[in-house]
Image (spheres, grey):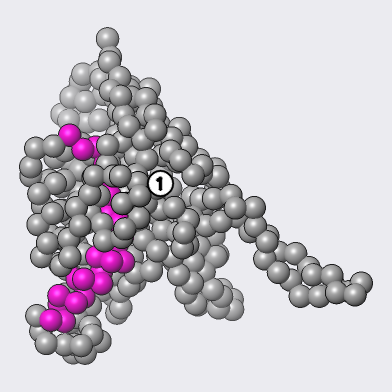
Amino acid sequence: MALNGVISGRRMRMRRAFFYATAGWGKSTWAGSWPNPIAICSEKGMDDIGCARLEPKTWDEFQRHLLSIGSEDHDYKTLVIDTADWVEMILHQAICQKYSKETLSDFDWGQGNAKAAKAWQWIVGTIQDTLDRKDMGCVVLAHARLEKFTSPEGPSYDRWVPDLADGTKGTPGARSLLIEWADEVFFGKYKEYSAQVDTKGKSGRAIGVGSGDRVVFTSERPNHIAKRHIEMPDELTFPAVNGFAVYQSYWPRGQQQQQAGASVVAGDIHGIVTDGHSKKKEVA
């Protein structure tokens, strides 16, 4: 006898991506190429893209906008947070202002970090509730920074990480929560190489050179954080326009789902995507 409610096979759905990149990579442009996006943003990069957007100035306004996307009627298919480090900044400002502190470190016993972690749990939970209610995908953007990593197996070294707090003393920070929540965590940077400068016939110092290609890393390496839940290359080149199509080409599709004894075909969830817009695919 089959258990009631058992689901088998791949389920086609919009993805939850956490994307961080070096300055000028084109994070907002990539997010804007997703199907019918609505962005909660602080940066003016969306002005040039023309993406539908909300521009809160305070933590209270951010909360109201996020709740409204989950509760009001609309046809948007992608929620974009641009950027998570800006959200963290206004959140920390609000906490410090409420308790008359200069920084979170002025709180006793890590209470400031605990309050921030609780707020981020609310953010992630509210985003997920919105995606479930509205059948949406999500892109959370962040800037990248270099951080000293202390390896338990050898010397310390620098690696690229999202420019967010990682938590302290067992309290998860925004970075940890978003990495755990996301289906994919991508790191974007420009392709670069090192070359030796020839000085009077002798090899001199090394310099960095690049081709201008935008590359995305999809799995973790010593010099960056990344992860993925689907099969795709460790390194991808994204075009300047409609990079979403490259990502979507690796999504699982065309599998059978079994739910409560019934067979359901999982097709391409939002049809064929062209220039960042979705066209719903009719299923006979």
Percent across and percent down for residue 101 are 16, 87
In-image side of 45 versus 88 (left or right): right
Residue displayed at 35% across by 55% down: 45
Answer yes or no: is residue 114 visible: no
The one of 45 and 216 positioned closer to us in this rendering? 45
Q: In this view, does 62 lie to the left or right of 44?
A: left
Q: How crowded is mark 1: few (under 14 residues within 10 Å), some or many (20 or more)?
A: many
Q: In which quarter of the image is residue 140?
A: bottom left
Query: Is residue 81 or residue 184 the one in the foreground?
Result: 81
* Magenta span of residues: 75-97
Q: Mark 1 points at which residue?
A: 30
**Where's the C terminus, which quadrant?**
top left
Apparent side of residue 274 relative to residue 270 in the rendered image (left or right): right
| Secondary-structure class at tag 1 | helix
In percent of width and height, residue 52 lies at 24, 44
Amino acid type of disc 1? Trp
